[in-house]
């Protein structure tokens, strides 16, 4: 912790503070002003024009009775839990790259992981959309070719789901019960370049003496992962965890592109962000959408605070 | 060596920076004409990314710039998927282009607040018709629809200049049709269409290629299904009273719904939904998850025999399809159909159709007089001819000869009024969401009409009520906005009785406000009826 200094000393070279003014101005204009505007407009019935009617807390009380909004948290809850598991492949890949003895190969694997980042996210989304195509998509072709489809049809017959039927291609995004599984499958094998690089940075800070000591003690590779590597990259895991929660709760691009503005059949793909978008741009209820955004902000803030308080990393 | 490479890299970076800087400076300080005047830039945004349209707009812009060397027209094509939010953010943010295509995502309030009414210019002759027989004709009378495509029914003002006509058609791959049926005869009735789809199924099952009878998507399928649905409410609409127009009278049909004249259990609605389900079985499984582009690919790649879409897709399809295709009116059940024929009056007239691709002038325009002039240029007969020849789209101006490729899409004037849809105006966000969220129950492999109706029944009227209340708020806000203007004009007219212009403007706005008042009262009447229905249903 830096030592406290007197106000006189702090203001001795006051001109230096001017250097942060442009940054402060930009942050204020582009981050805080829109947020403040959203807070202000959440108290109005406003449809994006210049006419607005002050309605106090009506938008917030309406949120409490908005079953679409609350139901969307069920979907988002499932996606958050799934995303926790979807972090595992990135951790494993980072460990595998870290353990490569050849620096040259380590470099090339890092390049291979980073390369897909060049492909715009939208292109990846479109490719996946094609994978899910019921008639010509890769996913259904693979399931047909491997016989998994037949297995799924048999299981369906046992439990009477009515989802998988012989001779009818699986409508991954057209059948309500398959929407959340499709959103989970999306991105397989779930290796995020940013995640791998962050975990790798954490792994590289582990001293070689730790590994040497472990080798002398006859520790197996898996035990090394469990008792050395994983505990020592928990700071990075926690960072990714927080970013993932925020990203999942705020995000709606995937659902919007794959399922449309209504959240797909049965509204099963409706997430809070998409509902906010729907209210603003389809219903023209911008004031209500601002209130939803504010609600979401508070929710994420509370989750992050809980995470910071209870998900501790003991070094 | 490293030093040389670094120098090259730095030089390249510096060069790019200088080019970018000069470009920005040029845009900000403005280009100059040869005479030294500042070049005026008019930006025009639209969502028509279909083949041919951007080329046509470029051709028209080029022609305009040739006549007006001091003006540069810049086209901004925006994808349909994001148009709605792009438009609103641009309007609210004050960064909207001069000219914007209207009709998607712009509410009445947005129109009144952010767009310039074009009623004045609609009532005067178009200078770009000088020399032809429209020389002295008011602009609005030069369009086949009386410029209704640019008219806002609630605000009672013209807010757009429409430059194209459009119809919806069933497109058929002729080579494939001949291969499957041995002839090139197009289906004329729903019965023939269904028989053709059975032939396609047989063809696929008997060792032929796997062919989809009708390529469906969440964009294309509703066009076909809604057309079939309204064939079943055709007779009912006439029973509800003369609609007064050649299209649906949404207010009247909504009122009739609340009065119990029709509903989810009436046989017309059940028949319409039954037709929708029946035709859905002839599209590829899971079609509601497929987008418009994917469905078009199925058709142009020869994987589907037919597709239903608008005349706006004809150019794109002809550019991509390696086969001849024909376009015909969507076949409806004939009056002789044993199950569906009883509700049908006859083929639909397309005479009630309005012109499309309506272009509005925004208040954010720095050069409204130039932008208005460009709009008038686009609406001139000569320019509209250039438009149809280049884009192959239907023209909107009377007397313009459609391009031969556009002729199969010309509106068929003969026929009867179409019926009414289940939901009505597309702006009814919550009711439309209810339908969209449960549509799989109607068209899914294990769905049925009963399941669909049972799922939407509890919320159908309540959601309609929410939508109506929202519409009413928008109408009231529109009236409130005009009050200030009306009061100011009244004061001017009182203090300066000699100012005939102020008096005329006052009279016009006063008449428009009275009409809006009537609309608001009728909306409140509908809301009361809806509330009564909700109460009745809850008992």
Image (cartoon, coloured by chain):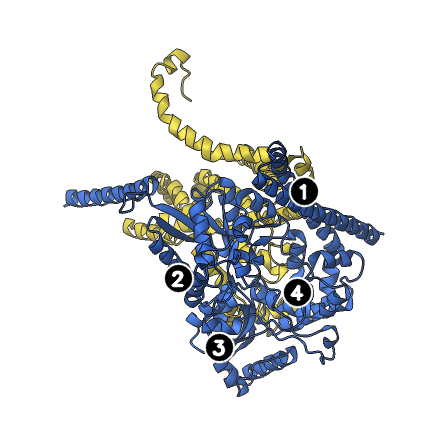
Query: Mark 4 touching mark 2, by CB under 8 A?
Result: no
Query: Mark 3 touching mark 4, by CB under 8 A?
Result: no
Query: Distance between the Cα atoms at labels 4 and 2?
Result: 33 Å
Circle nearer the N terminus (3, 1)? 3
Residue A90 visible: no
How far across and down, in percent of the image, does residue B198 sit?
61, 81
Query: Mark 2 touching mark 3, by CB under 8 A?
Result: no
Judge depth for marks 4 and 2 and give the one in front. 4
Badge 1 is on which residue? B476
Judge depth for marks 4 and 1 and give the one in front. 4
Mark 1: few/some/many CA within 10 Å (<14, 14-19, 20+):
some
Query: Distance between the Cα atoms at labels 2 and 1?
Result: 42 Å
Circle nearer the N terminus (4, 1)? 4
Identify the subunit bearing mark 2: B
**Vertical position of residue A84 compared to residue A162: above or below:** above
Mark number displayed over residue B55 = 2
Badge 4 is on which residue? B246
Query: Distance between the Cα atoms at labels 2 and 3?
Result: 23 Å
Circle nearer the N terminus (2, 3)? 2
Circle nearer the N terminus (4, 2)? 2
Identify the subunit bearing mark 1: B
Circle nearer the N terminus (3, 4)? 4
Judging from the image, what is the letter of the chain drawn in yellow? A
Badge 3 is on which residue? B325
Q: Nearer the viewer, residue B81 or B186?
A: B186
Identify the subunit bearing mark 3: B
Local secondary structure at mark 4: loop
Q: Residue B244 sits in which quadrant?
A: bottom right
Mark 3: few/some/many CA within 10 Å (<14, 14-19, 20+):
some
How far across and down, in percent of the image, does residue A211 sit?
37, 42
């Amino acid at each position: 912790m830096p030592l406290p200094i007197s106000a006189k000393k702090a203001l001795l070279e006051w001109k230096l503070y001017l250097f942060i003014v442009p940054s402060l101005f930009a942050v204020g204009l582009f981050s805080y002003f829109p947020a403040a505007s959203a807070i202000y407009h959440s108290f109005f019935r406003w449809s994006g024009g210049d006419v607005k009617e002050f309605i106090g807390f009506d938008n917030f009380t309406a949120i409490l009775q908005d079953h679409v909004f609350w139901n969307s948290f069920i979907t988002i809850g499932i996606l958050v839990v799934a995303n926790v598991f979807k972090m595992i492949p990135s951790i494993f890949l980072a460990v595998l790259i870290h353990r490569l003895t050849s620096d040259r190969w380590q470099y090339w694997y890092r390049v291979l992981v980073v390369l897909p980042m060049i492909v715009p996210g939208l292109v990846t989304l479109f490719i996946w959309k094609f994978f899910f195509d019921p008639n010509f998509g890769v996913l259904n072709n693979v399931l047909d070719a491997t016989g998994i489809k037949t297995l799924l049809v048999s299981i369906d017959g046992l439990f009477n789901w009515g989802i998988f039927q012989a001779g009818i291609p699986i409508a991954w995004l057209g059948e309500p019960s398959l929407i959340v599984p499709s959103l989970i499958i999306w991105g397989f094998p779930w290796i995020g370049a940013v995640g791998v690089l962050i975990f790798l940075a954490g792994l590289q800070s582990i001293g070689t003496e730790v590994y040497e000591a472990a080798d002398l003690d006859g520790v197996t590779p898996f035990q090394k992962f469990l008792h050395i590597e994983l505990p020592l990259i928990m700071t990075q895991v926690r960072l990714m965890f927080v970013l993932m929660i925020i990203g999942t709760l705020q995000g709606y691009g995937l659902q919007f592109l794959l399922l449309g503005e209504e959240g797909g059949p049965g509204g099963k793909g409706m997430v809070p962000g998409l509902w906010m978008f729907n209210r603003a741009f389809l219903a023209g209820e911008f004031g209500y959408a601002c209130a939803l955004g504010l609600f979401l902000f508070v929710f994420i803030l509370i989750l992050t605070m809980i995470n910071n308080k209870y998900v501790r990393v003991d070094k | 060596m490293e030093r040389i490479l670094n120098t090259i890299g730095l030089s390249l970076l510096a060069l790019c920076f200088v080019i970018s800087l000069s470009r920005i400076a040029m845009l900000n300080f403005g280009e100059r004409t040869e005479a030294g005047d500042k070049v005026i830039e008019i930006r025009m945004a639209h969502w028509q990314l279909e083949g041919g349209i951007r080329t046509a707009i470029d051709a028209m812009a080029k022609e305009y710039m040739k006549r007006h060397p001091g003006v540069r027209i810049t086209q901004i094509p925006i994808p349909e998927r994001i148009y709605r939010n792009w438009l609103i953010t641009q309007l609210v943010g004050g960064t909207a282009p001069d000219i914007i295509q209207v009709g998607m995502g712009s509410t009445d309030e947005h129109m009144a607040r952010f767009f310039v009414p074009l009623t004045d210019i609609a009532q005067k002759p178009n200078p770009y018709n000088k020399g032809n027989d429209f020389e002295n004709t008011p602009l609005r009378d030069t369009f086949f629809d009386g410029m209704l495509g640019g008219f806002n029914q609630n605000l009672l003002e013209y807010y757009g200049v429409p430059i194209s006509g459009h119809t919806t058609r069933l497109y058929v791959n002729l080579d494939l049709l001949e291969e499957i049926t041995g002839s090139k005869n197009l289906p004329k009735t729903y019965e023939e269409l269904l028989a053709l789809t059975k032939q396609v199924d047989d063809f696929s099952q008997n060792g032929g290629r796997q062919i989809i009878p009708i390529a469906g998507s969440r964009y294309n399928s509703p066009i076909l299904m809604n057309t079939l649905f309204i064939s079943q409410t055709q007779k009912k609409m006439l029973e509800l009273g003369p609609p007064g127009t050649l299209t649906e009278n949404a207010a009247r049909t909504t009122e009739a719904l609340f009065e119990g004249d029709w509903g989810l259990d009436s046989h017309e609605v059940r028949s319409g939904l039954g037709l929708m389900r029946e035709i859905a079985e002839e599209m590829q499984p899971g079609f509601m998850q497929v987008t418009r582009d994917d469905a078009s690919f199925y058709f142009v790649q020869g994987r589907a025999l037919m597709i239903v879409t608008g005349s706006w897709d004809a150019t794109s399809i002809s550019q991509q399809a390696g086969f001849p295709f024909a376009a015909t009116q969507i076949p409806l059940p004939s009056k002789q159909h044993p199950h569906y024929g009883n509700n049908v009056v006859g083929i639909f007239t397309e005479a009630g159709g309005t012109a499309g691709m309506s272009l509005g002038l925004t208040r954010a325009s720095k050069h409204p007089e130039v932008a208005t002039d460009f709009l008038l240029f686009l609406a001139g007969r000569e320019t509209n001819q250039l438009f149809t020849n280049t884009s192959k789209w239907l023209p909107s101006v009377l007397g313009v000869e459609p391009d031969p490729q556009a002729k199969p899409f010309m509106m068929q004037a003969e026929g009867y009024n179409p019926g009414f849809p289940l939901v009505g105006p597309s702006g009814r966000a919550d009711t439309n969401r209810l339908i969209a969220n449960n549509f799989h129950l109607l068209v899914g492999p294990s769905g049925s009409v009963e399941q669909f109706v049972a799922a939407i029944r509890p919320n159908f009227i309540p959601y309609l009520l929410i939508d109506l209340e929202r519409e009413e708020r928008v109408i009231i806000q529109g009236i409130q906005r005009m009050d200030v203007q009306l009061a100011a004009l009244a004061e001017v007219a009182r203090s300066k009785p000699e100012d005939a212009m102020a008096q005329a403007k006052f009279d016009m706005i006063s008449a428009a406000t009275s009409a809006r008042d009537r609309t608001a009262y009728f909306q409140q009447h509908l809301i009361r009826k809806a509330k009564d229905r909700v109460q009745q249903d809850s008992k």
